[in-house]
């Protein structure tokens, strides 16, 4: 089982201009303090960027994350997290995607992921 399956991440929408993913908040993604672990924000942003980036590639190519920056804005404790990622640049070798994560109406994180095409 891969990480996406393990965490229950579902693709809500995915095309070349926008990717939307949803993940339920469960015990396994929590810190001991009862809030979602910050690393989950990174997982969601990089996963959304990877899904979008790989949609533009030809067979035999893969987009792999090489840089990830995340700002944690607010805690989340229940419900689900929704990440929306949009591309800033889609080049032949490098793509840059921005992501925003929401827990309901509350924005909980923002980030940027750079991927390289190999």
Image: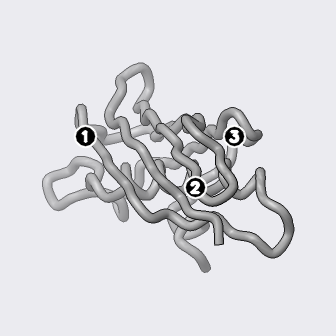
**Most foreground residue, 27 or 87:** 87
Q: Is mark 1 on a helix, strand or loop?
A: strand
The image quadrant that residue 19 belongs to is: top right
Question: Circle 3 is placed at which residue position?
Answer: 12
Circles 1 and 3 in contact, beta carbons < 8 Å: no
- Label 1 and label 3: CA atoms lie apart by 23 Å
The image shows residue 73 at horizontal and vertical percentages of 24, 33
**Most foreground residue, 32 or 83:** 83
The image quadrant that residue 31 belongs to is: bottom left
**Most foreground residue, 90 or 53:** 90
**Disc nearer the start of the sequence (3/2):** 3
**Disc nearer the start of the sequence (2/1):** 1
Circles 2 and 1 in contact, beta carbons < 8 Å: no
The image shows residue 103 at horizontal and vertical percentages of 41, 32
Q: Which mark is residue 94?
A: 2
**Disc nearer the start of the sequence (1/3):** 3
């Amino acid at each position: 089982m891969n990480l996406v399956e393990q965490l229950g991440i579902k693709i809500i929408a995915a095309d070349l201009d926008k990717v939307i993913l949803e993940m339920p908040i469960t015990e396994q993604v929590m810190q001991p303090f009862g809030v979602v672990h910050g690393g989950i924000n990174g997982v969601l942003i990089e996963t959304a960027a990877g899904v979008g980036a790989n949609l533009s590639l030809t067979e035999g190519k893969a987009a792999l994350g090489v840089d990830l920056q995340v700002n944690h804005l607010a805690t989340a404790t229940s419900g689900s997290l929704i990440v929306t990622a949009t591309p800033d640049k889609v080049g032949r070798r490098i793509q840059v995607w921005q992501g925003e994560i929401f827990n309901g109406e509350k924005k909980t994180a923002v980030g940027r992921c750079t991927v390289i095409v190999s």
